[in-house]
Image (spheres, helix red, strand yellow):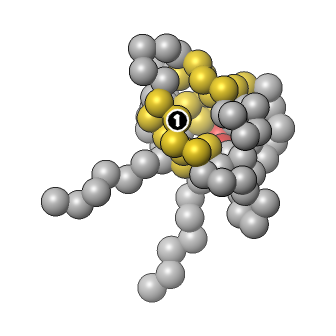
């Protein structure tokens, strides 16, 4: 059985709140190479959580897909190498 993929989000835009479609994820602060240590965050029953490294506020939005975010570029898509 494969390990589940944990979505990663960043806040390169520097917005106050990043809306995401998941409650369990990793915050990386900024896109590489300027990322901070990747922090696993779990909102549990809450709808918001603050990253302890970069203070980005993440808000759960159930209307978004797991790979969607507001701003739209906050979901991190790693470059794939063959």
Residue nearer the viewer, 61 or 9: 9
What residue is rendered at 81% in x and 42% in y? 13
The image position of residue 78, as x and y in percent, is: 56, 64
Q: Residue at x 42, y 21 (%)?
A: 44
Left or right of residue 60: residue 37 = right
User: Residue 2 at what x, y percent from top left?
Assistant: 23, 60
Is the residue marked by circle 1 packed among few (<14), some (14-19), or many (20+) residues within 10 Å?
some
Image quadrant occupied by the N terminus = bottom left
Furthest-right residue in view? 14
Residue at x 57%, y 71% (from the top left corner): 79
Secondary-structure class at tag 1: strand
Task: Tell whether 13 sits left or right of 76.
Answer: right
**Nearer to the camera, 16 or 49:** 49
Q: Specify the farthest residue to the left.
A: 1
Q: Give residue 52's quadrant in the image.
A: top right
Q: Is residue 18 visible?
A: no
Query: In the image, what residue occupies the spot 73% across and 32% down?
Result: 56
Residue that extends furthest to the bottom in the rendered view of this protein: 82
**Residue 34 in which image quadrant:** bottom right
Q: Is residue 1 above or below residue 75?
A: below
Q: What number of labels is visible?
A: 1
Q: Residue furthest top?
A: 46
In this rendering, the answer to whether 75 lies above or below 32 is above
Q: Which residue is mark 1?
A: 41
Position of 44 with respect to 28 (left or right) is left
């Amino acid at each position: 059985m494969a390990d589940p993929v944990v979505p990663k989000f960043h806040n390169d835009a520097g917005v106050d709140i990043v809306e995401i479609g998941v409650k369990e994820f990793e915050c990386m602060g900024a896109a590489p190479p300027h990322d901070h240590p990747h922090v696993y965050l779990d909102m549990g029953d809450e709808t918001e959580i603050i990253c302890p490294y970069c203070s980005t506020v993440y808000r759960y939005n159930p209307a978004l897909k797991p790979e969607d975010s507001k701003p739209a570029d906050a979901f991190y898509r790693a470059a794939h190498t063959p």
